[in-house]
Amino acid sequence: MTELERRALLGDRQAQEECTRQGILLPCWKCGGEAEVNELHTGGKPIYAAACKKHHCGAYGAGSASVPKAIEFWNTRPAPPIGRCMECEHLKDNDGVCLYCEVFNMTTPGPEAFCCRFEPKGGE
């Protein structure tokens, strides 16, 4: 990860704008995975939206008539929570079988994933 991308992920608006100008897609806001721009066909003119490449994640950005605007929508975001699923009080271990998030009622995409509902484990 470059210094520019790191600053953009920390919520630096200028860094987000520069990433957009350079065509850099920031990692997924939901799981941290790699993103891509998809062309969506709606029966008329195509629209474009950035999305996480991990299909089980399901994160999508807003649709736009142009690729650069789709990248801008994806890259423009507030700073993410400081923490990962493994550090969150909402993560539960289902008898050693799988890691489960109580907030989203689902197994997690992985202990290293970021969470938009992050709460540190008790007293941390």
Image (spheres, rainbow, N blue to C red):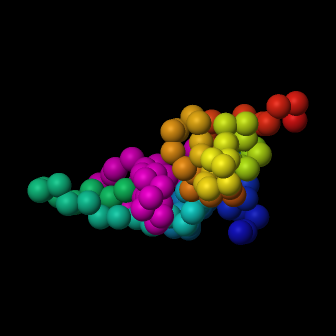
Query: Residue 70: x, y in percent?
Result: 41, 55
Q: Quadrant of residue 5?
A: bottom right
On the rendered structure, is 41 left or right of 106? left
Nearest the eye: 66 or 55: 55
On the rendered structure, is 105 left or right of 47? right
Q: Is residue 63 visible?
A: yes
Q: Is residue 71 visible?
A: no
In the rendered image of this protein, does residue 103 appear above or below residue 60? above
- The span shown in magenta is 50-77
Query: Residue 14: x, y in percent?
Result: 66, 50
On the rendered structure, is 59 left or right of 89? left
Residue furthest toward the right? 123
Query: Residue 99: x, y in percent?
Result: 63, 51
| Residue 53 is one of the magenta-drawn residues | yes
| Residue 25 is one of the magenta-drawn residues | no
Question: Going 42% across and 62% down the picture, which residue do you hit?
Answer: 55
